Amino acid sequence: MQTSTVRLSLPSKGRLQDMALSFLTQAGLSVFKPNPRQYQAEIPALPELGVLFQRPGDIVASVRQGSVDFGITGIDVLEEKRGDNGDILILHDALGFGHCALTLAVPEAWDQVNDLPTLKAWSATLGRPLRVATKFPVLTERFLSQQGIPHSLIAAEGTLETAPTIGYADIISDLVSSGQTLKDNRLRALPDGVIQPSQAALIANRKALQERPETLEMARRLLEYIEAHLRAKENLLVIANMRGESPEAIAHKMFNETSVGGLQGPTISPIIVREGQPWYSVTVVVRRDKLAQAVGELRQVGGSGIIVSPVTYIFEEEPPRYTAMLAELKR
């Protein structure tokens, strides 16, 4: 394995690691790790990029300090540990996996506490600040202070959900995804108690992007793959046979529909037939969530023999988030 001067840090264990590796594989950036015990790997599609594995919080610290150029971690950990000096630049804040939210949760027995105002009132009833157990003191402190809720934070390790039952905290501030773990421990999330929505994000060291051309070029290549993949996931390639007087006449009928206009328009090419009215092959990209509607519209304008295929990439002239990154670096 070669030594690389540009490095990407990935989560070292758990669901976030599994999802990150799966995401990169789907984007054409499979990670090759010859020894499962090693904390280094490589991406054959980007041989100049070395891969490290770290805990999510350590990824943020490493990118902030510049010992690692890029990282994939959760927005929750990023906002907790990024600091205020702007050393970290978010290249992509919506990779589409690792969804959760840092949320306030109260015991189910607190029937009268249904939102933040009643939580604040409950604190007054207790006659003391609420004891809040959390692993995210920065975000939790900021949120509770903004809401004017009297509180004292209790730093916790391990499982938080048992804190109210044991009695060393009144409520918790913890990451919630499905909410099942809260229910199992007789807790419920407050609907207006979401402190920080989160999913996986791609981050980078600002100084490395500004001072090292090879890092800037790697940012472009990473965003090229990732954005093209994410855009492709939302779309499907649809091919249909269609009778018509001309490509222009067929396109006119398609433009009168709502979901078969394509990216810029349909691709229409002649089909060689022995005799009779001309046939054309129509190719169009449609949104995945509009497939049923698109098939119906194609049939309505004369389409038949409809074929649907997944799309691997849809490349733009320039990745929009790369353009946004360059603008941010100039500020």
Image: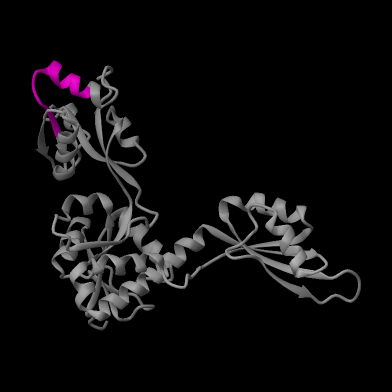
Q: Residue at x 20, y 40 (%)?
A: 159
Q: Nearer the viewer, residue 66 or 14?
A: 66
Q: Is residue 42 above or below residue 198?
A: below
- The figure's colour scheme reads one colour
Q: Is residue 78 magenta?
A: no
Relative image position of residue 73 (x, y in whole percent): 27, 57
Q: Is residue 189 above or below residue 237?
A: above
Q: Nearer the viewer, residue 33 or 308?
A: 308
Relative image position of residue 1 (x, y in whole percent): 27, 82
Check the picture and name the quadrant holding the C terminus: bottom left
The magenta segment:
119-132
Q: Residue at x 19, y 59 (%)?
A: 60
Q: Residue at x 79, y 58 (%)?
A: 302
Residue 34 seen in the current view = no
Residue 306 seen in the current view = yes
Q: Is residue 130 magenta?
A: yes
Relative image position of residue 285 (x, y in whole percent): 60, 62
Q: Is residue 82 above or below residue 9?
A: above
